[in-house]
Structure formats: C-alpha cells, structure tokens
Amino acid sequence: MENKFKYSDADLDSFDRVIKEHGWIIYEDVINPALLQEMIDSLSGSYQKRREIQIANGIAENMDGTLHHLVERDTFALHFLDQKYCDAQIRHFLGGNYIINSLGAVINTKSAGRYVQNVHRDIRSFTGDFKLMLQFMVVLDDFTLENGATWFLSGSHTNEEKPDDEHFYNNADRAVAKKGSMIAFDANLWHAAGKNYTDQPRRALTGAFTRPFFKPQLDYPRALGYAFGEELNPHLRQVLGYNARIPENLQEYYQPVEKRMYQPGQG
C-alpha cells in the first residue's frame, strides 16, 4: 500500500489534496482502544438481532454479515459520535454542519458472497464537485490483501459512469490498514469489498455523514425519541439530526426560532 493514502495527523491541507486527487484517505491509529473493543464486542448481538429480521422478512440472501443502523441508545454509537473523529475534515468537505446518514458494519468472512463485494458507490446520484456525503470505515481488524481489504478506484469520484469490472480490478488500489484506523472517502468514489481468503472475519464499521438537508437512511431522532434528544449535548443533537427535523403539523411549524424543528445553520 502506498503511503500517499496514509496519514497520522489531521492536517486539512493534506486531507484536501488527497481527497481531491484520489478520493480517499487513511488515518492510522485513530480510534481509542477501549472504544474499539466496545465496537467489536457489540457486533455479535447486534448482528443476531438484525439477521433475525432479515430472515423473517425474506431478504436474507446475500445480506449475511451486514449490519445496518447501529445508532441506538445503549450501544457504542453515541460514544463514537461524541468523539468527533475527523470533525474538521467532515466540516471542510461538506461546508459546515453535518448529520449522520447511516452507521452500520460488515463482517466479511471466507464463505460470504454479498452485495458489498460488487463494484458500487453508495450515493445514487453523481454530485460532481458539489459534495453531499463523506463516507467512512472504522477498521476493526487489520485490512490485508488476504482478508478482503477494500478496493478503491482512486480518482473515480470524478467519473459519473460505473467502470466495468475489468478496468476496475486492473486499476484499483487496496485499502491495507491497521486495526483502529479510520478511512474516509468521497461518496462518488467507485469501490468494492475484497474477498476474504482467510479463516478469520474481517470486520469494519461503515457509515456516512451528509449535509443536514440530505435525507438520512433512518429517522434517528424519531427512533431514539424526541425527549431523549433533550438530554444530549449540542454536538450529538446536531450530528444525530435533531436540528434538521421536519415539522409534522402547524403547531410544530409555527414556533419561535429557538424551538423550530429545523434550526438555522443546516443548509
């Protein structure tokens, strides 16, 4: 793996240059070890809960090892978001305030064959120079060539058309990274999970941040509860979307500024 993608500091000039040229960057040894272990310990129970729903609803095929919407009251999610990892980079990329669009995980195993191994990008509409979403991965196990380190077609965030598989795999780079690293990438970037050839799982936390007016994948304020939001600090209220809610009725709409569902500074 070339060092041009790896950085140990939070220098915004380096972030800007690497993201603009390549579309992705690795920050090594970022995540607090205790929080990292909390993430890992939570995956088994969280996966079982989601897998039961996938099976019951008839959508289990190709979704094994995938966990969606891990923002819950009593798990690591609020601890993670409250640490403001890469906050300056996210604000720089998105031009100000941001919210969480999704937070999930992937457990990549030797026997797995799932949709994340297809060449894809996770934002449906190509946005070019107007940036709506910055994606990230938290590396929970060392990413290696053998266990399925993610493929990134560097520079492809400037291309609207999906590359064919031959071009992609002949030209893509691999995100080889240490456990505890955080990988940030432009949502326009074409990528794919690698195939795991080992007997051990390759686990990663996955997610995305967006400008506040962009619709999240789940209504986190409603899921967590409006009353619960009153107990949160200003940063968590912002990033969880409490400042960018939609009024349900005229009573909620006609409010003084400080009580409005959609607060100033949300784009």
Image (tube, rainbow, N blue to C red):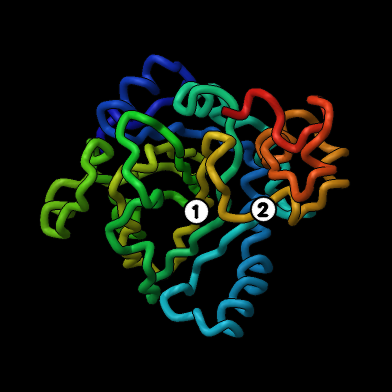
Find residue 167 and report its horizontal and vertical position in percent.
12, 52
Residue 144 at least partly seen: no
Q: Nearer the viewer, residue 135 or 173?
A: 135
Left or right side of 84 for 257? right
Residue at the (43%, 64%) spot, across then down: 108
Q: Is residue 176 visible?
A: yes
Q: Nearer the viewer, mark 2 or mark 1?
A: 2
> Which residue lies under the disc numbered 1?
204
Q: In the drawing, what numbered circle is on residue 219?
A: 2
What's the residue type where badge 2 is placed?
Asp
Quadrant placement of the C terminus: top right
Disc 2 element: loop
Tag 1: Cα neighbours inside 10 Å, few (<14), some, or many (≥20)? many
Q: Earlier in the sequence, mark 2 or mark 1?
A: 1
Camera-side residue: 104 or 261? 261
Placement of the N terminus among the 4 image quadrants: top left
Residue at image location 60% in from the left, 38% down from the top: 99
- Image point (48%, 47%), residue name: 139
Q: Mark 1: which secondary structure?
A: strand
Q: Kindly report the distance in space between the C-alpha atoms of the residues bearing marks 2 and 1.
A: 23 Å
- 218 in relation to 153, above or below: below
Q: Going by the image, does 180 lie left or right of 53?
A: left
Give coordinates of residue 6: x percent, y percent.
36, 30
Q: How many marks?
A: 2
Counting from the top left corner in percent of width and height, residue 22 is at 27, 32
Which amino acid does the dot numbered 1 rest on? Ala
